[in-house]
Image (tube, helix red, strand yellow):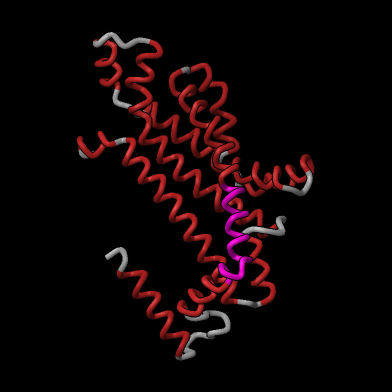
Amino acid sequence: MSVAVPVAALVLWEICSRLAIVSPRYFPAPTTVAWTVGDRLVAGDLAGGLLVTLARLAFAFALAAVPAVPLGLLMGIARPVRDLVEPYVAFIFPVPKITLLPFLLIILGVGEPAFVLTGASSAFFQIVISTLGGVQTMDPRLLEVGRNYGARGARLFWKVILPAALPSIFTGLRLGLGLALVTLVAVEFIAAKSGLGHLVFRHWQMLSTPEMYAAFALVGALGLVLTRGLRALQARVLTWQEDIGV
């Protein structure tokens, strides 16, 4: 059923475009877009844009996740740290991170550091909040059982707290990855001269709609593949979730 709906929509789009019920100039048929994807990948411009966006996303996601997960865990287990940091997180989190780009461009100049940091900022706060939520919502009985078995300090953290928070951490990583991709594509629209977002914007300006849709489709495919990959990694790491029906 989940596949039938998008397939039916694509078939309807194909028919409407071929019969000129909608303008093929603005809504090229999906088969035309698919052919354009293959053609431009072979030509190299679409493949180059994909690699640039993927590299930016990898750096931004790593830059966000590496400090965000420890910070979220620390906020969850240490009340003073949470009281100190949480107001800043609550203040900055709702702000669209693309608005940080002008400030970063002033500080760092037009270039990759500003682009990557803007994308990283979107993922960072989402991962912190999800990780913190995973610690705060864990079943208190797990801590009690761990202590009854002699777990204290670091042992309690590694054996009880971290495993209990891992599902929320992975959820935060998936959401953060998606937010980072959205922000980076917006950055490529505005300031970059490379990447998939830049290709979408450039072909829109030129009214090269098949190429525009091709770049857009590749953005969606990239997000789908990466988030599904993280979900598969979660299922592999947290095999106990399936055993208890989580």
In this view, which residue lies farthest toward the left?
Answer: 244
The C terminus lies in which quarter of the figure?
A: top left
Let me know if residue 4 appears in the view: yes
The N terminus lies in which quarter of the figure?
A: bottom left
Relative to residue 10, is residue 86 depicted above or below? Answer: above
User: What residue is shown at x 52% (from left), y 16% (from top)?
Assistant: 80
Let me know if residue 94 appears in the view: no
Number of callouts = 0
Residue 199 quadrant = bottom right
On the image, the x and y values in percent for residue 194 come to 68, 59
Q: Over which residues does the magenta segment extend?
A: 40-57
Camera-side residue: 111 or 236?
236
Relative horizontal placement of residue 6, taking residue 58 as reference (left or right): left
Relative to residue 173, is residue 21 depicted above or below? Answer: below
Find out whether residue 157 is within the magenta segment.
no
User: What residue is shown at x 41% (from left), y 45% (from top)?
Assistant: 230
Camera-side residue: 165 or 111?
111
Residue 141 quadrant = top left
